Amino acid sequence: MSGRFPITDISPVVDGGRYPARAVTGEQVPVSAVVFREGHDAVGANVVLIGPDGRRGPFIRMDLSAGEPWTARYHATVVPDRVGCWTYFVEVWSDPYATWHHAVEVKVEAGQGPADLANDLEEGALLLLKAARFAPRPRRTDLEQAAAQLRDTTLPLPERIAAAFAQAPVMHETPIRDLVTKSDRFKIWVDRTEALYSSWYEFFPRSEGAVLPDPASDSVGPPVHGTFKTAQRRLPDIAAMGFDVVYLPPIHPIGKVNRKGKNNSLDPTAEDVGSTWAIGSDEGGHDAVHPALGTIEDFDDFVAATREQGMEVALDFALQCAPDHPWAKEHREWFTTRPDGTIAFAENPPKKYQDIYPLNFDKDRKGLYAEVLRVITHWIDHGVKIFRADNPHTKPVNFWHWLIWTVKKDHPDVLFLSEAFTKPHMMHQLAKVGFTQSYTYFTWKTEKWQFQEYMAELIAAADYMRPNFFVNTPDILHESLQYGGPAMFKIRAVLAALLSPAWGVYSGYELFEHVAVRPGSEEYLDSEKYQLRPRDWARAAAEGSTLAPYLTMLNRVRREHVALQRLRNLTFHHVDDDAVMAFSKRTVTPEGREDTVLTVCLMDSHNAHWGNVSLDMPALGFDWHERFPVTDQVTGATYDWGQHNTVRLDPYGEPAHIFTVHRYGA
C-alpha cells in the first residue's frame, strides 16, 4: 500500500486488473472501494472515469453504503457512453468541511457556547471562503455570506452556524479535498449494448428451401435443399417475433469423407447432406460458402436483408475440419498425428466424430493463428459482427485471448459468444479473457432453489461474464421439454427471457418439438444437424399450433422495459410453494425514471398451484406498507398488490404472471 490513506477491495477489478472489467454503453456500472483513515477526521472518496479518448469525466462523489456505515465501503455509479477501453481510479482525501461540521455539531449538543467555539467558528469561515474561491458566482455569494455569518458575534450561536450547515449539500458535491490519495488505475472494456442485451434465433438456412407436400395429398417428396435466397423468406417472421440476432450454424462446404447420415449414423446415403460442423471439402474451407446455399454474393444479400429487418447475423465459428478440408491436405502440421500416421479425429467418449479433425494450436502457432485471423476478418468484411465460437474450451485459452483482442483493435464492435458447456473454471476464464457472452447451465436448472443459487453466481461474475440463456440448441433437448408438455415450453421461455438480458431459441421450439432420438438422450430425433428438416410455418400459424405469439410478447416486454435489459438488478421474492418462483428487476434511470417488472412463474407444467407471495418491498422501490397497481403483460389484467399476495397459476391456462409495476397517481 502507498499513499496517505488506505484504499482496498476496489471493484470492478478482474483478477487483480489482469483483465478489463466489462460493461456496455449506457449501463450503470457500480464502482466501490473500502476507504478509511486514522483517527476521527472525515474522509471522502470519488471515482475518476477516463474515456477511450483520454478525457477525464466529471467529478463523481462516492458515498458510504446506506445503512452500513461501519463497512467503510464507498459506492458510486459510472455510465460509459462509448465503445472502447475506459480507465478508472479512486481518489481518497481528507474532508475538512465534513470534519468541521461534525465537530461543531457535537460540541453544540454538548452545551458549548460561542466562547468555547471561537476557533471552530473561525475555522469554518476560512473553509467556506476557501471553497468560495473556486465556486461560480451565485454559489460563491452564498458561501461568502455563510462565512460572514459565522463571524458575526451579534447573532445567536444557532443563527451563526445555520447558514454554514446549510452549505452541506454543496460542499458534498464540490468538496474541499486535502491530502488526495489515488488508487491504481483499472480498465473497463465497454461494448455496444447488444453485448449484454439481445434476443437470438438460430436456424439452418438449408432447411428453409424444402418444398412441403400438399396437406390434402398423401405423397411426401424428398426435401429440397434451401439457399440463402429461400432462407430470406423466413426473416420477416423472425423479426416479427422480436428477435434481433439471427444465428446461422456453419454455412461452409461440408466434408464428404466419413460423412454422417441421419441421426449421426455411419452409413450415409448419397442424399445425406452431412453435419454442418464437419467443415471443408474440395469445394472450399472456412472462408467459403456451401455451393448448395449459393454464392458469397448471395450471402451478402442475406446479411443485407437481415439488417433491413432490424436484425443482424451471427455466424458459427467452428475451428475444426472435415478430413477432406483443404487445411488437412495443405497443412498437416496443424493437426495431431497418431503413431500410425493418421490424423486423430474428434472424440468425446462415448461419442465419436469420425467426420471431424480437431486443430492442434501448439504445432505451428504463427501459421495457424495468422490463418484463423484471416478467416474471421474475411467474414467481418462481409458484414458479420457477431461470432458464436463452437466448443471454445477445446482450444487454448491464450489463443482466444490473442484472437479476440487482436480483432477488437480494428473492430471494437465485434462480439463473441462462447459455447462452452464445461467446468465452471474454464467457463469463467474464457469470459475473463475476452468472450462477450457465454452459454450457461440454464438448460439443466429446473428447481427454484437451483435458479436462486445460479443467478447469484452469475451476478457475482457480472463484472466480466454475461450469460446467454438458450432454451434449446440443436444438441440439447432437455428432458423437461421432452416430457413437460406445451406449458413447459412457455415456462422455460419466461425464465430464459426475463432472468437473463440475453436469451436464445433454436428453430422448432415454437412448434413444441420434443421427441428425442432415444430415451435418456438429449439429442433430437431426426436431428437437423445431420439432415434437412423442413417445417410448415404457415400451417402452424393457421392452426394456432405455434408458440410464436408468446415469444413475440416476451420480446416486446423485454424491449419496452430497460430493467429486463440488465443483469445485476435481479431480486428473488419469497413464495411458500417451491413450485412457484417470484423475481423482479428494477432500474432507476439517471433521469430518475423507475422501471420495474415482477414475474411470478410456475415451475410445474402438469399441476396448478396456489402460492403466497411475500415481496421485498424496498427492492421494488416501496415502503413496506404501500400498495401499488400491477398490469399482467400476458393477459392485460390489472391488480392491486402489496407486500403479501396470493396467486394461482395453472399450466393449462397461463403458467406465469409478468407484471409491470406502477405507482398510484403516477
Image (cartoon, rainbow, N blue to C red):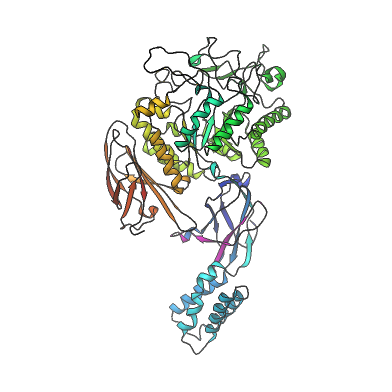
The quadrant holding residue 448 is top left
- Judge whether 326 appears above or below 116 on screen: above
Residue 40 can be seen in this image: no
- For the image, the number of numbered tags is 0
Q: Which residues are magenta?
A: 41-69
Give how far across and how far down residue 491 sits, in percent. Answer: 37, 35
Residue drawn 41% across and 26% down? 538
Quadrant position of the N terminus in the picture: bottom right
Give how far across and how far down residue 215 sits, in percent. Answer: 38, 18
Residue 55 highlighted magenta (yes or no): yes
Residue extending furthest toward the bottom? 154
- Judge whether 271 appears above or below 476 on screen: above
Q: In front: 422, or 496? A: 496
The quadrant holding residue 656 is top left
Quadrant position of the C terminus in the picture: bottom left
Q: Is residue 342 left or right of residue 515?
A: right
Residue drawn 71% across and 21% down? 333
Q: Is residue 281 left or right of residue 217?
A: right
Q: In front: 134, or 226? A: 226
Give how far across and how far down residue 223 sits, in percent. Answer: 48, 16
Residue 537 highlighted magenta (yes or no): no
Residue drawn 56% across and 76% down? 138
Residue 526 can be seen in this image: yes
Residue drawn 53% across and 70% down? 170
Q: Is residue 180 left or right of residue 489?
A: right
- Judge whether 99 appears above or below 591 on screen: below
